[in-house]
Amino acid sequence: MKKLSLVSSIVLASLSTGAMAGNFYLGPSLFYQHNSASHSSFSGLHPRLSLGYGSMMGDYYLGGEIFAIPFTAVMSNSNSNGAVSAKTTHGFGISFIPGVMVNDTLLAYLRLGVISSKFSAPNTMKTGGQAGLGLKVPLSTRWDMRAEYIYTAYQSISGLGSVKANEIGIGFVYNFGSTCVGNYKSTTVYKS
């Protein structure tokens, strides 16, 4: 928890410098998640609520985000050889999000972060490292839509071993200022 607090402080401090003009954003996403371990697998759907700050610097984007996963709906849950379930119920985390403009309205970005998830059967919280790819486009002066793929590698769990997660999601972002993606480069797209 101390590491998570330290990383979030550094990210937020670096994003608040005067060299970058950006804005805070808030958004919901829906993810399909597949967790796998040696003798267990789990698939489910979960919402993700995100609060972040992002800024454009020329063709480059830099953002930081905290997020929460309030629950997970089960699609399939299978174990063999007496293994415990790889099901996660909820979680929270932080991400560093660097990106680059592909054209006037399409932002491609990486997600690098940490997540802490609650595993149901071993009844334990475990931390995992995350890496992902995403695309974001403006829908209006304040709304963006994004699609992402995220890979997570969790610490080893007793009775389960190493758990890997793959997630694919789509979401929306409400920008408290105008959207960075549409406003930054094109004079014809969503000027405020």
Image (cartoon, grey):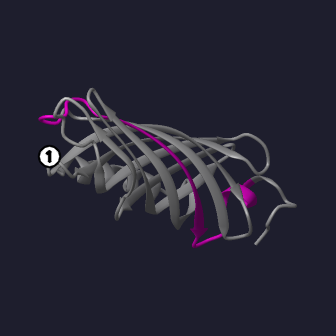
Q: What element carries label 1?
A: loop
Towards the viewer: 111 or 12:
111
At horizontal 52% and vertical 66% (from top left) the residue drawn is 27
Q: Can residue 88 be seen in this view?
A: yes
Q: Is residue 9 visible?
A: no
Q: In this view, does 47 lie to the left or right of 42?
A: right
Towards the viewer: 87 or 50:
87
Q: Is residue 177 magenta?
A: yes
Q: Does the magenta stretch include residue 39?
A: no
Q: Residues within 10 Å of mark 1 (few under 14, many from 20)?
A: some
How far from the left and from the top, in percent, is residue 167? 47, 43
The span shown in magenta is 157-184
Q: In which quarter of the image is the C terminus?
A: bottom right
At horizontal 66% and vertical 67% (from top left) the residue drawn is 143
Res 74 → quadrant: bottom left
Q: Which amino acid does label 1 sit on?
A: Pro
How far from the left and from the top, in percent, is residue 128? 29, 40
